[in-house]
Image: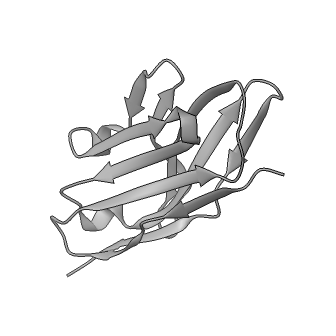
Amino acid sequence: QVQLVESGGGLVQPGGSLRLSCAASRSIFSINAMGWYRQPPGKQRELVAGVTWGDSTNYADSVKGRFTISRNGAKNTVYLQMNSLKPEDTAVYYCYIESRVPAQVYWGQGTQVTVSS
């Protein structure tokens, strides 16, 4: 069973930066896309950023210009560089990897990001 292990969350002041990482426990073949969702307190989970195997990216409007998603295909790892963080970015962040064969979505366990002074 593939597990996604996340790291890099924590407490940061407004305007600060964090870098999240997500690595698969073993190789995943035929990856379609990788990315990050988040779930703020009391709200539904929302897409933050995604990247396809062809390196097309998409971002939530609220994070455009501040967050950057990247991946290391050889290591089945996806990153999220978060700059100019705001209190409203506070959430549990979940990474995902979507594979074609088998058709499956793998999820990380979640990492807490808290933006507060």
Is residue 52 toward the left or the right of residue 70 in the image? right
Q: Residue at x 72, y 40 (%)?
A: 105
* Residue 20 found in image quarter: bottom left
Is residue 3 toward the left or the right of residue 71 in the image? right
* Residue 87 found in image quarter: bottom left
Q: Nearer the viewer, residue 72 or 10?
A: 72
**Identity of the residue furthest to the top in this view:** 54
Is residue 93 toward the left or the right of residue 105 in the image? left
Measured from the top left, where is residue 86 in percent x and y?
A: 23, 63
Q: Is residue 117 above or below residue 26?
A: below
Measured from the top left, where is residue 61 in percent x and y?
A: 31, 37
Q: How many marks?
A: 0
Q: Which of the image's four quarters has the C terminus?
A: bottom left
Q: Nearer the viewer, residue 103 or 62?
A: 103
Measured from the top left, where is residue 43 in percent x and y?
A: 52, 61
* Residue 76 found in image quarter: top right
